[in-house]
Image (cartoon, helix red, strand yellow):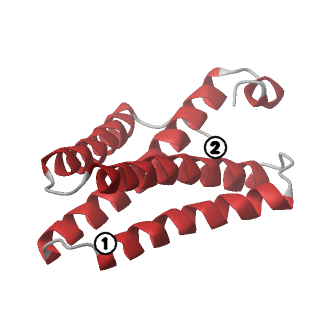
Amino acid sequence: MNQKPSNAFVAASWATLLTGITAYLIGLWNAEMMLNEKGYYFSILMFGLFSAISLQKSVRDQLEGIPVTNIYYGLSWFSTLLAIVLLTVGLWNADLLLSEKGFYGMSFLLSLFAAIAVQKNTRDSIAKELPAKQDAELYY
């Protein structure tokens, strides 16, 4: 990485993340479903966000030569795909309109992608501000 991400890209990434999460949560708040169903969809969002960030970090670590165990790398991929599969199965079996299912799917994927972009920007910004790569590894 030779340069720090632009302020516009950082702002767009954060705005996209907040938009995706907010839309998803507003949809859950207004949904006419049982509380346990809302909890399921909320848990999948949190699990998906965490696993996507973990996947981005492990992929980036490998590219930069930072040791990552194969089991952690594999679990990062597995958990990200599992979050997507769990949402898909939940929506497939849900008693929702097709437009609602599409809304949840799109806001979920938007949130995952934006979380990856925010993590990348954060890492690139910190790495550019620190004088040496060894110092940067201490912060993430």
Q: Position of residue 58 (x, y in %)?
A: 71, 51
| Contact, mark 2 vs mark 1 (Cβ under 8 Å) | no
Quarter of the figure with the C terminus: top right
Location of residue 133 in the rendering, given as x and y in whole percent from the top left corner: 78, 31
Q: Is residue 128 left or right of residue 118?
A: right
On the picture, is 38 further left or further right than 33?
Answer: right
Q: Which residue is mark 1?
A: 91
Q: Residue at x 87, y 48 (%)?
A: 67
Task: Give amino acid for label 2.
Answer: Met
Residue 15: give x, y in percent of width and height: 28, 38
Please tell me whether residue 51 is drawn above or below residue 8 in the rendered image: below
Residue under the image location 28 percent in, 57 percent down: 107
Judged from the image, the secondary structure of the residue bearing numbered disc 1 is helix
Hey, what amino acid is under mark 1? Answer: Leu
Where is 5 relative to 78, above or below?
A: above
Residue at point 18%, 44% (across, down)? 29
Marking on residue 113 = none
Q: Position of residue 73 (x, y in %)?
A: 75, 59
Of the image marks 2 and 1, the number of the one nearer the N terminus: 2
63 to the left or right of 56: right
Q: For the N terminus, which image quadrant? A: top right
Q: CA distance from mark 2 to mark 1?
A: 39 Å
Q: Which mark is residue 1?
A: 2
Mark 1 burial class by Cα count in 10 Å: few <14, some 14-19, many 20+: some
